[in-house]
């Protein structure tokens, strides 16, 4: 009876289905928990403080010598510090761990997957369970993104272009690559003496590489032109290949040409040295030219319009130049110029004396105030000009010439007739060569700034003691830059009899 019951239970489909579901659930649970360690498996835990987690995630492997010995079970910030703290669960087979052991975070693939590598130390003391290892910055290797980020955008584009071109060049050339690899041993056999020669200091390979880099940098902007040049050279070489004899003759004569170049080119070094110095001086001019080109372009555009009128201007200028030529050839030109020079030499002292009359004393303006007596008067037909005469019959009593006094006053040199008629009853106030400035250029405007004498006399003294100063609208001194003379030069002052 008992045997039949047990057979009936094992044959029950419900029991078998429930048992299967239980096993599947246990397997799924174990698979899910495997990332955090299997249950009931003894482990050793270590805490590792690193500068940064370097994109580690919980569940990443811990390896030693390429073999898995545990996993990362937890990643959290360092308590009270900077960086990240990794919790490592190591298999019991990895214990004990020497206390001088270190760790490194390494990439597992190019897709960014990482693992922690344990570098076992040689110390005789072991780390306790739960001990902390502090890792320095060297434990975190460079990221692949950091490596590629050292190149700027143009460099990355050029690398991409190079890979595309090189990949296209290698595509479908497996046989050629195999033959090249087969030839490498022979190449490497001949390579050591070549490398010894290149490594010799007299070869100056370093300078060659630097100069090649400079050459490449200079030629880079002209890459399109050089590409077109190589295409044209291909056409040239294709044409040369049609006449092998001519090509052979050219190659045969090349050594002599090169020898001549070796002999002649050193003589060009002074020229190249001067050219280099000139290039340095022109470099600044070229920089200034960049900023000046817009103005130069506008000037050239304007000059183009002017140049169209240049032929007509030249035709019109031809007559002027002919007249100037005739004037230069005329025998009277030199005497006229000499006379003009004499005139200027004679006139210059006068102008130096007369100049302050206008610029300092303003007498030229004052002289026009007399025009107030010269005005237009209405009459039956319109207007008529009237002049109030300043000179009047001298024998007329209280005439206009007397200016309100019974004795006339003369305003100029004594007339002999007037002297004979009036005798000593003449009061003359006159200075023929009066001062305008003193010898220092200070204003001394004497004209119109002296009083009349009370007695009947003639006063022609052309110097009043002291500076009389400027007139009402005059200046205090000679303007800056103007030459002057306080006394008339070349002409003696008049002396009355």
Image: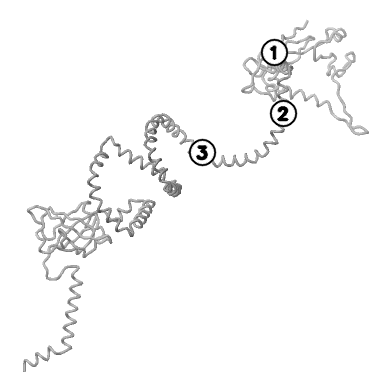
Residue 70: image quadrant is bottom left
Coordinates of residue 352 in the picture (x, y in percent): 67, 17
Q: Is residue 397 above or below residue 306?
A: above
Q: Is residue 206 above or below residue 322?
A: below
Q: What residue would you read off at disc 2?
A: 320
Mark 2 vs mark 1, foreground winner is 2
Quadrant where the image shows the N terminus: bottom left
Q: CA distance from mark 1 to mark 3?
A: 57 Å
Left or right: 59 in relation to 274: left
Coordinates of residue 99 in the picture (x, y in percent): 11, 54
127 vs 354, nearest the viewer? 127
Residue occupying the far top of the picture: 497
Left or right: 472 in relation to 246: right
421 vs 16, nearest the viewer? 16
Coordinates of residue 246 in the picture (x, y in percent): 42, 43
Residue under the image location 30 percent in, 39 percent down = 205
Q: Is residue 3 above or below residue 67?
A: below
Q: What residue would you read off at disc 3?
A: 289
Q: What residue would you read off at disc 1?
A: 488
174 vs 421, nearest the viewer? 174
Label 2 neighbour load within 10 Å: few <14, some 14-19, many 20+ = few
Q: CA distance from mark 3 to mark 2?
A: 38 Å
Coordinates of residue 489 in the picture (x, y in percent): 68, 12
**Residue 225 in view of the camera:** yes
Which element type, helix, strand or loop, lies under badge 3? helix
């Amino acid at each position: 009876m008992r045997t039949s019951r047990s057979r009936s239970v094992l044959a029950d489909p419900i029991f078998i289905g429930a048992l299967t579901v239980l096993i599947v659930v246990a397997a799924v649970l174990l698979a899910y928990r495997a990332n955090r360690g299997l249950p009931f498996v003894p482990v050793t835990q270590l805490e590792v403080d690193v500068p940064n987690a370097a994109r580690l995630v919980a569940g990443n492997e811990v390896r030693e010598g390429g073999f898995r010995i545990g996993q990362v079970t937890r990643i959290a910030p360092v308590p009270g510090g900077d960086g990240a703290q990794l919790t490592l669960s190591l298999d019991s087979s990895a214990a004990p761990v020497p206390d001088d052991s270190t760790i490194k975070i390494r990439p597992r693939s190019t897709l960014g997957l990482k693992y922690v590598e344990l570098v076992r130390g040689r110390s005789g003391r072991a780390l306790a369970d739960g001990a902390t290892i502090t890792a320095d910055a060297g434990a975190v290797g460079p990221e692949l993104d950091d490596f590629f980020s050292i190149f700027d955008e143009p460099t990355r584009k050029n690398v991409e272009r190079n890979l595309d071109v090189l990949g296209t060049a290698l595509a479908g050339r497996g046989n050629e690559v195999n033959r090249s690899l087969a030839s490498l041993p022979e190449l490497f056999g001949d390579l050591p003496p070549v490398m010894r020669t290149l490594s010799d200091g007299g070869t100056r390979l370093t300078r060659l590489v630097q100069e090649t880099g400079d050459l490449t940098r200079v030629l880079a902007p002209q890459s399109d032109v050089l590409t077109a040049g190589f295409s044209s050279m291909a056409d040239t070489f294709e044409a040369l290949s049609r006449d092998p004899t001519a090509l052979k003759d050219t190659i045969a004569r090349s050594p002599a040409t090169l020898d001549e170049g070796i002999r002649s080119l050193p003589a060009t070094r002074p020229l190249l040295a001067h050219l280099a110095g000139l290039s340095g001086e022109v470099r600044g001019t070229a920089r200034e030219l960049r900023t000046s080109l817009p103005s130069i372009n506008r000037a050239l555009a304007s000059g183009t319009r002017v140049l169209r009128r240049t032929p007509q201007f030249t035709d019109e200028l031809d007559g002027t130049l002919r007249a100037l030529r005739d004037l230069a050839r005329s025998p009277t030109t030199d005497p006229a110029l000499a006379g003009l020079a004499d005139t200027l030499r004679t006139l210059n002292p006068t102008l130096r004396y007369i100049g302050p009359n206008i610029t300092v004393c303003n007498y030229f303006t004052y002289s026009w105030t007399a025009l107030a007596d010269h005005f237009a008067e209405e009459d039956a037909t319109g207007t008529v000009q009237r002049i109030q005469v300043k000179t009047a019959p001298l024998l007329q009593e209280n005439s206009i010439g007397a200016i309100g006094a019974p004795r006339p006053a003369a305003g100029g040199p004594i007339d002999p007739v007037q002297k004979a008629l009036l005798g000593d009853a003449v009061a003359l106030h006159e200075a023929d060569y009066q001062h305008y400035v003193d010898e220092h250029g200070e204003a001394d405007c004497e004209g119109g700034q002296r009083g009349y004498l009370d007695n009947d006399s003639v006063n022609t003294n052309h110097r009043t003691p002291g500076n009389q100063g400027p007139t009402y609208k005059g200046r205090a001194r000679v303007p800056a830059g103007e030459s002057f003379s306080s006394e008339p030069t070349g002409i003696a002052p008049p002396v009355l009899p």
